[in-house]
Amino acid sequence: MAEQDRYGSHLSPQHPTNPIPDQPSVNVGNIPSPKGSGAEQDRFGGWFGGKKDRFGSHFAARPSNPVTAVGLLQSTVLPSFGLHSGLAVIAYGASRAADRAEGKDWLWPSGQVINAWWSAIGTRVVNDGLSLSQAWSTITYPEKLLLGGVSAWGIRLFYHIASRSVARGKDDARYTAAKKDPGFWNKAFFSMFLPEAVVQTLIALPFTLPFRAPVANAQASPLPPYAELFHGLAVFLFSSGFALEVLADAQLDAHREKSSDLNREGVWSVVRHPNYLGDAYVHASFPMLLYSAGILHPLALIGPVANYAFLRFVGGDKENEASQAERYQRENPLKFQQLQEYRREKNSFWPKLQELGNPWHWAVLGAGAAGVALEMGARRLLK
């Protein structure tokens, strides 16, 4: 048995839990498949159709990428920022024309999904001359799962934000107050839209680095022991977070239809901002998935950290509660009193230990376990 190189193929295709058939070599653009006996694996590619890693070849045919800090800046960070800042310009123009600053909220999930797909598929179609099907075939199973997770998160959140905005028929209350400043729109791009483009660039690192700099990712992260366990934990974390977001938004919408009181039921009885907690879980799952596949670059850890910092201290619960407190104190003293009580009883973001007895806490964990079972079943069907 020939030795397996570190970045090519970790496990045999005859592995009893994951048989992967050999695949023919592929040409990328004008890059020919290297010739060889088939006994040894190419250092980074799995070109020869030998033994594959646990989900397929660690890399399908892809051009090499610089692995230095400058190379990563050029290949990943700057193109990503260019995309997000360009989308921010478009969103700013549309928002200013409509006099609705919430256009930047529409861009938050959609811009990140666009960046993920552009990095994974678009760059290969445009730069390498591949067809869509060929570009898709260069992506390994963990990368497809990553792309699917980002898409599910972003599309759901975009639909929720857009449908709520359309139903409301006017700008979000947070921005209505800010627009009282006569110079708001002249400053909004540099004070709101562009800074969020920077944050989105950082948050997107876990789902842009693997596609734009695959060699650097594999060099930084060998396939870990208990890879299957970490893969399952990543799916569990994503499924729990996604379920928490869905439940939080659905329960809040249902509550608003029947009552004007502050909602403290359902998953809102666990923490004051279950939707933001779910979002943090989702983004934390992406680096763990990369780690389980042996393609985690340390820079990808910036993504969930930046997302958490933004949710906690910039545009998430801090901004939301400040706006709520101001409006309720002025317009609805009873609701303001309920908010004060809610703050005393429940944590803003992380559940208290006593929430272990909350049935909604276990319902979310059950959803996470169900997600693991579904993914395992789907993976077996795809073999």
Image (cartoon, rainbow, N blue to C red):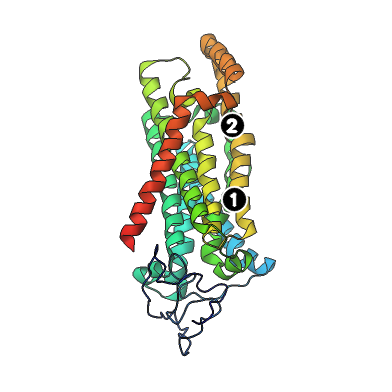
Secondary structure found at label 1: helix
Label 1 is placed on what type of residue? Gly
* Visible residue check, residue 101: no
| Disc number lying in front (2 or 1) | 2
Residue 206 vs 100, above or below: the answer is below
Q: Residues within 10 Å of mark 2 (few under 14, many from 20)?
A: some
Residue extending farthest top: 334
Residue 173 in picture, x, y percent from top left: 51, 26
Q: Is residue 341 left or right of residue 151?
A: right
Q: Quadrant of residue 344?
A: top right
Asked if disc 2 and disc 1 are in contact, CB closer than 8 Å, the reply is no
The image quadrant that residue 69 belongs to is: bottom right
Disc assigned to residue 175:
none
User: Which label belongs to residue 303?
Assistant: 1
Q: Would you say 208 lies left or right of 383 here?
A: right
Residue at the far right in the pictured view: 69
Dot 1, crowdedness within 10 Å: few (<14), some or many (≥20)?
many
Badge 2 is on which residue? Answer: 350
Q: Please report whichever mark, 2 or 1, sits nearer to the chain's N-terminal start.
A: 1
Q: Position of residue 215 (x, y in %)?
A: 57, 70
Residue visible at 60% across and 25% down in the picture: 322
Quarter containing the C terminus? bottom left
Q: Position of residue 302 (x, y in %)?
A: 63, 51
Q: Residues under labels 2 and 1: Cα distance?
A: 19 Å
Residue 222 versus residue 84: which sits nearer the camera? 222
- Observer-nearest residue: 154 or 4? 4
Residue 256 in view = yes
Q: Residue 47: horizontal and vertical position, in percent?
A: 46, 80
Residue type of the residue flagged with mark 2: Trp
Question: Which residue is drawn at the image coordinates 64% and 69% (left, top)?
Answer: 71
- Towards the viewer: 230 or 108: 230
In the rendered view, tell whether residue 312 sits above or below residue 259.
Answer: below
